[in-house]
Image (cartoon, rainbow, N blue to C red):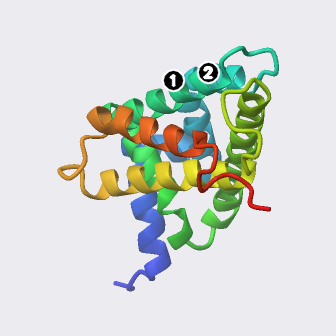
Amino acid sequence: MARRTKEEAQQTRCHIDIARAADLTRGAIYWHFKNKEELFVSLWEELCQPLSHQLDACVAEQEPDPLGKLRSFLKEVLVKISTNPAHQQMFTIMFNLESLEGEAISLREHMRSQSANFFRDLETTLANAVRLGQLPRGLDLQRAATLLHCTLDGYIINWLHFPERIDLTREADFLLDSLFALIALPNGPAVRRP
């Protein structure tokens, strides 16, 4: 029997994870989708669709409370990840894409594009909040969006690895209140320096 390469083993593991997240067999996956990328993108869009309207409201220029909408959206994301096994599996796969090779390269690029779009939406929402006086005028949008994005990713990754350490649902309000208070400080770390 030939030995499988590390890459083949990772791809098989990825197929198993995707099948589990979709509640399908690996055979059903191969039948309906031409590759992992197509499957993952389809599942990701299906899982994200219910939340996308909330994010659209965050970036809308006419939204009177962009910060409130963003907070509601982010809390819903954290709760979904901590309570929905399909969301947990998809985020686990997403955060492990960097270690995969071969076919996963195009999937990794797709997820980087999605991340860039989310980052842009964060900046737009924060800019709307500055315009409406919810955040200080001198806020460095890129720094504040990076702080939010990286801190949330860090919490999620730590929760995925150590769920006994963090009760993500219970800690969501603390995390979001802390982050939003930090970026709202008039002379805080996210404000542009002269």
Q: Would residue 172 be found to the left or right of residue 75 on screen? A: left
Q: Position of residue 187 (x, y in %)?
A: 63, 50
Corner quadrant of residue 1: bottom left
Q: Position of residue 193 (x, y in %)?
A: 74, 60
- 162, above or below 88, in the image: below
Reading the image, the residue beneath label 2 is 54
Q: Would residue 131 be found to the left or right of residue 30 on screen? A: right
Could you give the CA–CA distance between mark 2 and mark 1, rounded to whole angstroms? 8 Å
Mark 2 or mark 1, which is nearer to you? 1
Q: Amino acid at mark 2?
A: Gln
Q: Quadrant of the C terminus?
A: bottom right
Q: Tell me whether circle 2 and circle 1 mark residues in contact (CB < 8 Å).
A: yes
Q: Nearer the viewer, residue 193 or 150?
A: 193
Q: Residue at x 55, y 42 (%)?
A: 31
Reading the image, the residue beneath label 1 is 72
Residue 9 appears in the picture as rendered? yes
Q: Would residue 120 be found to the left or right of residue 92 on screen? A: right
Q: Residue at x 65, y 48 (%)?
A: 145
Q: Position of residue 152 (x, y in %)?
A: 48, 48
Q: Residue at x 62, y 27 (%)?
A: 67
Residue 24 appears in the picture as rendered? no
For label 1, the SS is helix
